[in-house]
């Protein structure tokens, strides 16, 4: 099963959207648009053919040891799934076409990074 890593831009060093944020609707829309467009172009740059099914997981390397709830990252994951659809990787983000796993948080020193892994499901011949 081929796996592709796609970087998701951080917003001032943090994930662009979380469940704990209380953003003005205009700021939320701006972050959604910027993130979705960036991920769409990065998916298109892979030149992958349209798939019948993919599996996606969001990963966040925090750069520190603070505890975080992994489900807070689901809004960013949703934007990434929408970007995969817009890029033509899958026709829709319904459960028949996309399986997604809970976001993974990687604590520890180092550079902060946010990325998705896209697993292409190989069809048995």
Image (spheres, helix red, strand yellow):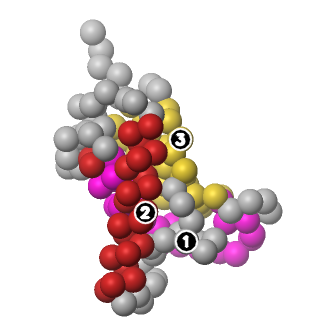
Q: Is residue 53 left or right of residue 43?
A: left
Tell me the SS state at disc 3: strand
Query: Number of numbered discs present?
Result: 3
Residue beneath label 1, please? 11
Check the image and report above or below for 118 versus 93: above
Circle 2/circle 1 CB separation < 8 Å: yes
Chain-order first, disc 1 or disc 3: 3
Name the quarter where the N terminus is drawn. Answer: top left
* Pair 1/3: label in front: 1
Is residue 104 in view?
A: no
The Cα atoms of the two marked residues, 3 and 2, are separated by 16 Å
Looking at this view, name the residue that lies furthest to the top.
125
Among the 4 quarters of the image, the one containing residue 90: top left
Task: Give the mark, 2 or 1, whose residue is nearer the N terminus.
Answer: 1
- Residue situated furthest right in the rendering: 109
Image quarter hosting the C terminus:
top left
Q: Can you identify the residue that label 2 sits on?
A: 35
Magenta: main secondary structure equals: helix
Q: Which mark is residue 104?
A: none
- Which residue is depicted at the point 57% across and 58% down? 114
Q: Residue at x 27, y 40 (%)?
A: 88
Q: Nearer the viewer, residue 53 or 28?
A: 28
Point out residue 14 in the picture as x, y percentages from the top left corner.
59, 72
Q: Nearer the viewer, mark 3 or mark 2?
A: 2
Q: Residue at x 27, y 49 (%)?
A: 86
Location of residue 7 in the rendering, given as x and y in whole percent from the top left corner:
54, 50
Q: Say if residue 26 shows up in the picture.
A: yes
- Magenta-highlighted residues: 61-84
């Amino acid at each position: 099963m081929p796996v592709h890593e796609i970087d998701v831009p951080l917003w001032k060093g943090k994930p662009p959207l979380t469940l704990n944020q209380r953003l003005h609707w205009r700021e939320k829309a701006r972050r959604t648009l910027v993130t979705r467009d960036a991920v769409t172009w990065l998916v298109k740059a892979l030149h992958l053919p349209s798939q019948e099914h993919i599996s996606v997981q969001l990963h966040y390397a925090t750069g520190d040891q603070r505890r975080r709830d992994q489900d807070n990252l689901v809004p960013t994951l949703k934007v990434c799934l929408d970007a995969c659809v817009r890029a033509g990787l899958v026709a829709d983000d319904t459960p028949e076409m996309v399986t997604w796993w809970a976001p993974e948080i990687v604590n520890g020193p180092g550079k902060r990074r946010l990325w998705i892994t896209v697993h292409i499901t190989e069809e048995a011949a």
